[in-house]
Image: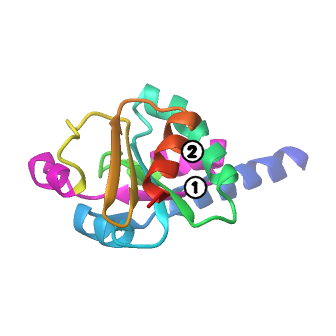
Amino acid sequence: MKLFQTIILLFVASAAVKAQSYQSTNADQLMSRVSGKDTTYIVNFWATWCGPCVKELSVFDTLQQNFKGKPVKVLLISFDFREDYQKKLAAYVAKKKPKPEIMWFSDTNADEFIPKIDERWGGALPGTLVIHKDRKWFHEGTVTVSDVTAAVQEMSTP
């Protein structure tokens, strides 16, 4: 009986993971959301298939906690492939339980979306954007808590 209950529980859990959905965004929608606001946004571009990306995601959990109650918002923008992002993203989230909001990036033409986000971005993952009103900081590659904290402080200082 316990084996049967365990099997049913695993089936239900796997169905829930597969059914989980993520809001998609494109460059125009993302930049509209984060630009010209009183809130400072920390936006990390990553993918579940990118080893350095996954390794650095704990940085953004820490930043989310460190800036709790302040006008700072952390967003994780997944670049997982269209055909499998629902399954891979859901499995990652179920296992690691990241704290920041996660969205899936739907644009596919880097020549069009990169200039909308930041001209300094060569397109490699991970990438991190800190934006406050009309001020931007962008870093291509992995970051540390202190890197991003310094950028947030710089962006927030008049």
Say which amino acid is labelled 1.
Answer: Pro
Say which amino acid is labelled 2.
Answer: Phe
Q: Earlier in the sequence, mark 1 or mark 2?
A: 2
Q: What stretch is highlighted in magenta?
A: 88-116
Q: Is residue 104 above or below residue 95?
A: below
Helix, strand or loop under label 1: loop
Given residues 26 and 17, the one toward you in this image is: 26
Given residues 33 and 67, the one toward you in this image is: 67
x and y, in percent, of residue 140 in the image: 32, 34
x and y, in percent, of residue 13 in the image: 67, 55
The numbered disc on residue 53 is none
Question: In percent of the image, x 41 and y 73: which residue is there?
Answer: 37
Q: Report whether 5 appears left or right of 138.
A: right
The quadrant holding residue 141 is top left
Q: What separation in Å lies between label 1 and label 2 (alpha carbons)? A: 7 Å
Q: Does the magenta stretch include residue 146?
A: no
Q: Which colour scheme is used?
A: rainbow
x and y, in percent, of residue 7 in the image: 75, 48
Q: In this view, does 75 lie above or below 147?
A: below
Given residues 128 and 5, the one toward you in this image is: 128
Q: Report whether 102 appears left or right of 25.
A: right
The numbered disc on residue 100 is 1
On the rendered image, what quadrant is the C terminus found in?
bottom left
Discs 1, 2 touching: Cβ within 8 Å: yes
Question: In percent of the image, x 27 and y 63: which residue is there?
Answer: 26
Q: Report whether 79 appears left or right of 19.
A: left
Helix, strand or loop under label 2: helix
* Number of numbered labels in the structure image: 2
Disc 1 crowd rating (10 Å Cα; few below 14, some 14-19, many 20+) is some
Question: In percent of the image, x 48 and y 58: which residue is there?
Answer: 156
Residue assigned mark 2: 60
x and y, in percent, of residue 34 in the image: 38, 67
